[in-house]
Amino acid sequence: MQKRKALGKGLSALIPDEQGFEESERRFFMCPVALIEPNPYQPRVDFSGPELDRLVDSVKESGIVTPLLVSRYESGYRLIAGERRWRAAQKAGLDRVPVIIREASGREMLELALIENLHRKDLNPIEEALAYRRLLDEGGSTQENIAKRLGRDRSTIANSLRLLTLPGSIQQDVMEGRLTMGHARVIAGIKDDRARKELRDMIVRRGMSVRQAENAAKRLAAAGPGKAAKVQADAYYYSLSENLKRALGTKVEISKKKKGGRIVIHFYSEEELDRLLGILT
């Protein structure tokens, strides 16, 4: 049985880059844009935004430099990789685009589209996770096999798939950039949906870093659901102490009481005390 090659070693073996374009002239041809349909296995959902607008401007100026990868389909062709270029060509008013034909199964079309987006960092974390899930569901594969095929660690695949356990509203936050992949992983580590929502609100409202979110998650787990107000206050003071620590270059503790509180600034030598006094006075 022939061993399948891994796809995670770059796009150069699949799609020629600008330098390799001349070498591929014998393999590509100028295909009418109207004969090409999108890849139904495309993992990317959102193609809008300034990046596509810049690509349209580039296409108007220089045309399509790198050929699209397509397979034969009915009376035309179906995209495997290069959907952004295809969409940009349509917006730019091109009638024909350079394409290279490669026959591929549905699974291979998904893999090739996925690896193109991963290498070009075109997918948001949820789109990436959904693509892995589709490979598992439709390809009958395992996380380990997918990792080998895509040149990734199995833990990367597993951590990505965990994002799909999050409520749809939080997944939307990740897709729209309100939460980072790191934030989402912290929230995914909490099992209670109410606690997840409380932590999400704290992160967005306070603009927490991932480290601050991790600390808040620990406090929330210890306090239990419904204690978000106290946890949020604790997280706020922790955030302040971290900011002071970075500003002063030493350990800082803030403790809150019913009325007032205290700030403790640590020093470990007379020289460090003089340095801190120079900053504070």
Image: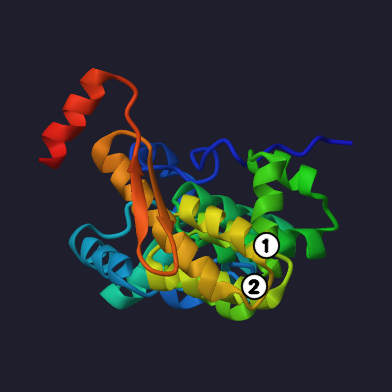
Q: Nearer the viewer, residue 112 or 172?
A: 172
Q: Nearer the viewer, mark 2 or mark 1?
A: 1
What residue is disc 1 on?
Answer: 221
What residue lies at 67% left-to-right and 74% top-to-bottom?
225
Q: Nearer the viewer, residue 201 or 150?
A: 201
- Left or right side of 196 for 38: left
Q: Is residue 16 above or below residue 270?
A: below
**Residues under numbered marks 2 and 1 in contact, where contact means CB atoms less than 8 Å apart:** yes
> How busy is the neighbourhood of tag 2: few (under 14 within 10 Å), some, or many (20 plus)?
many
Q: Which mark is drawn over residue 209?
A: none
Residue 165 can be seen in this image: yes
- Left or right side of 192 for 21: left
Quarter location, residue 4: top right
Q: For the residues marked 2 and 1, what is the alpha-carbon distance in whole angstroms?
A: 8 Å
Q: Amino acid at mark 2?
A: Ala
What residue is disc 2 on?
Answer: 195
What residue lies at 25% left-to-right and 42% top-to-bottom?
247
The x, y position of residue 167, in whole percent, is 65, 77
Q: Amino acid at mark 1?
A: Ala
